[in-house]
Amino acid sequence: MKKLIVLLLVAGVLFSCFAGGSKEAAQDNAVKAAVKAAETMSWDELLQKAREEIGDNELVIYGTTSRVNEKSFTEATGIKIRAEQPDDTQIYEKMTAEVGNGLYGADVFVTTDSFNLMNLAFANGYVENYVPGEYKDLIADSDENPLVALYYARLFIYNNGKGSLTRAITNVWQLTEPEFKGIEMKSPLLEKCSMNFLITLTSPEWQAKLAQAYKSRYGKDWVNDGTYPNISYEWIHKYIQNCTFINKDSTIASDIAKGSKGATGFFVYSKFRSEDYSGMTVAAFDGVEGFAGMLYPIYSVVASNAKYPYAACLYINYLLSNNGFLKVFGKDMGAYSTNTSVAISDGAKAAGDREISFWLENCVIEDSAYIPTVYAQAFTKIAQWCAGK
């Protein structure tokens, strides 16, 4: 009898485990099916489906940018949102703890960390990729899987002394020289997209561009004396040694705007909007050999256990629309939709911003395919240099 009771208890536990697993699998499959169906729907069809699904409940968004708190989506759809703003590290911690354990937390993730998105989120089935059918032909193939909703610019910007200082930065190697000691930027240890930017620089493509800029600056070819694995690591190391790490882009923008002539920062271009930028110059507009900053992607994906997958898809669709982009991200300078039919705002143009085609020519674009191939080695080396400051 005791043996029978034990067997029944074990069977009960096993059944509950399998039942739970089946329930989670069914939910994942339902989300996957909803995302696939949403890809073929028009805006109106998706809006109706989302409203039926969510009712008076809230769509939950985890996003690394404060812009996810923008309420224009609710005004356009009637669907309420609740947005949280963890940083990228926290997003993937929450994702692992919640989605990884079958617990509902969020419907949409908005993130900048391509490495963890590909190697943690997609690798473990925590998220689903959604590309609206109506925008598929307007988005570059390279921005569709995973979906890049938009790009942000993080640029080298300096105080021009109200016009008394011109062409302060003409070559990216200047940023490694003593004159530029004290460049303000967020630490790559805290800012995942900045780390990914530096790792991208180690690729053969950027080694070649840095070598060309080096020769232009110093009149000779770069020679590997064994100190660094390649030219990119030399630039990265010397640049980091010139940097002062600041916690917030907004603080850096303020410091540069109010600083002395020649003060230089590497910060999110959109932070211009909060300062008197009449005394600041975006290095890219003067022309910089090598590169003038970075474009980093803002990815938007659906949680594989989303409670409201149609509403999640509707939100992503909204971000890609002309009205949604301009309301949420594109009011000011520094943000660029991957929907090629969407131009920058009149306000951005008035501030001197350019369309994304200009930035693609002048900036480093995060290489999500290359980064994982060298991540462990590159991250360790760069992290040591950052930690040693």
Image (cartoon, rainbow, N blue to C red):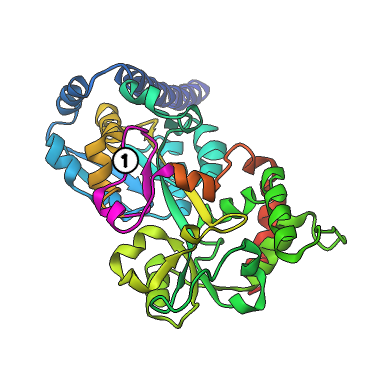
Q: Is residue 315 visible?
A: yes
Front-most of residues 130 and 252: 252
Front-most of residues 248 and 201: 201
| Element type at mark 1 | loop
In the displayed image of the protein, which residue is found farthest to the right?
Answer: 225
The relative height of residue 224 versus residue 63 in the rendered view (above or below) is: below
Which residue is disc 1 drawn over?
343
Q: Residue at x 50, y 77 (%)?
A: 262
The relative height of residue 178 versus residue 351 in the rendered view (above or below) is: below
Q: Is residue 92 visible?
A: no
The relative height of residue 275 versus residue 150 in the rendered view (above or below) is: below
Q: Residue at x 40, y 59 (%)?
A: 269
Number of residues whose C-alpha sits closer than 10 Å to that of mark 1, classed few (under 14), some (14–19) or many (20 or more): some
Residue 249 occupies quadrant: bottom left
The relative height of residue 47 versus residue 209 in the rendered view (above or below) is: above
**Is residue 225 highlighted in magenta?**
no
Say which amino acid is labelled 1. Ala
Stretch of the chain drawn in magenta: 333-356
